[in-house]
Amino acid sequence: MLIRKLLPTVLLLCLPLYAELEKAQSSAADFVQSFYSWYVPFARADHSRAAFELALKRDSSIFSVELAKALRADAAAQAKVPGEINGLDCDPFLNSQDPDERYELGKVTQKDGRHLCPLHGVSEGKKRPRPVVIAEVEQKSGHWIFVNFHSPEGGDVLSLLKALSAGRRKNP
């Protein structure tokens, strides 16, 4: 009996929290989709350097300090041995060497205060059924930043960059 009386009150108290979560997920989704709408055509074009490196140079404030630092270190190591793979062998934001024509955002979820944003590649009008990359974002000082990029098969860019860096220190 008491539960029936309290349930409407509990639900009313939870509504603002749910609304805030929905608002944050929508805001994160807008941030991620906006980046990919700009980045994908840029990454598909020919550049003298890796597209991710040029994106960092354009606006590093949209990446966490740790991610930006690791990506810059990888790009610098790669620049020391042109023509050889001495670092990432695919685009870290697209999880691919051959980007799709565009990327559509799937359902955004929240985990530990961060938002996971799955992206599905679309080519020739066909959307991949599984995401090709999952962008991890969080809000810092009132704006969104990318903190990592995950492969749906497992693994993530930060872990890979740390392993590559350790390997280069071991075998300079």
Image (cartoon, rainbow, N blue to C red):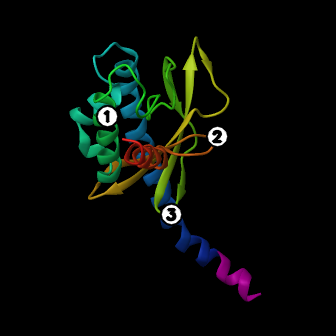
Question: Whole-Å distance between the Cαs marked 1 and 3?
Answer: 30 Å
Camera-side residue of 15 and 85: 85
* Quarter holding residue 50: top left
Query: Disc 2 marks which residue?
Result: 153
Q: Quadrant of the N terminus?
A: bottom right
- Identify which residue, 152 or 21, lies in the foreground: 152
- Give residue 24's position: percent from left, percent from top: 43, 54
* Identity of the residue furthest to the front in this view: 171
Query: Which residue position holds label 3?
Result: 112
The residue located at (25%, 41%) in the rendering is: 60
Comes first in the chain, label 2 or label 1: 1
Q: Indicate the amino acid at tag 1.
A: Ala
Which callout, 2 or 1, points to the residue nearer the camera?
Answer: 1
Q: Which residues are magenta?
A: 1-7
Q: Which residue is pictured at 34% across the width and 38% down the height?
A: 74
Q: Which mark is residue 75?
A: 1
Asked if 147 appears above or below 172 in the picture, the reply is below
Q: Is 5 within the magenta? A: yes
Is 82 situated left or right of 105 in this image? Answer: left
What residue is rendered at 54% in x and 36% in y? Answer: 133
Disc with the residue nearer the chain's start (2 vs 3): 3
Mark 1 or mark 3: whose residue is earlier in sequence: 1
Q: Most prominent secondary structure in the magenta stretch?
A: helix
Q: Nearer the viewer, residue 64 or 155?
A: 155
| Residue 163, disc | none
Query: Quick one: label 2, few (<14), some, or many (20+) residues within 10 Å?
Result: few
